[in-house]
Image (cartoon, grey):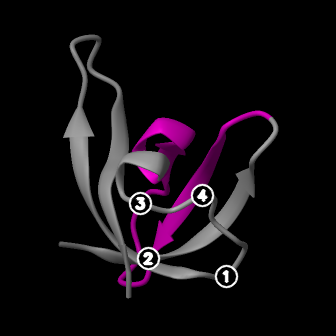
Amino acid sequence: MPVGTVKFFNSDKGYGFISPVDGGDDSFVHITAVERSGMATLTKDQRVSYEIETDRRGKQSAVNLASA
């Protein structure tokens, strides 16, 4: 599982981005993935581990989040 730092998360809009610590592209994260992981929200600079999931449209997002 990659580990990253929350770059941005807007609870009102329900989405944000995670930057992987080892470099590479940022990962989109939706509030539903955060809530499924048992968290209420994410905060800037919070370290999390996550998995990348590709939906049926080919879009990738972070899922299975956990504090790192």
Residue that carries the numbered disc 4 in the rendered image: 40
What is the three-letter code of the residue carrying label 1?
Asp
| Residue at 31% from the left image edge and 50% from the top image edge | 63
Return the x and y of residue 56 as percentages of the image width and height.
Answer: 21, 13
What is the three-letter code of the residue carrying label 4?
Ala
Asked if residue 12 is positioned above or below residue 47 in the image, the reply reads above
Asked if residue 9 is positioned above or below residue 5 in the image, the reply reads above
How far separated are the C-alphas under marks 4 and 1?
16 Å
Q: Quadrant of the C terminus?
A: bottom left
What span is colored magenta in the figure?
A: 13-34
Return the disc, 4 or 1, that comes first in the chain's sequence: 4
Left or right: 42 as drawn, with respect to 10: left
Left or right: 14 as drawn, with respect to 60: right
Residue 38's label in the rendered image is 3
Residue that carries the numbered disc 2 in the rendered image: 4
How far separated are the C-alphas under marks 2 and 4?
18 Å
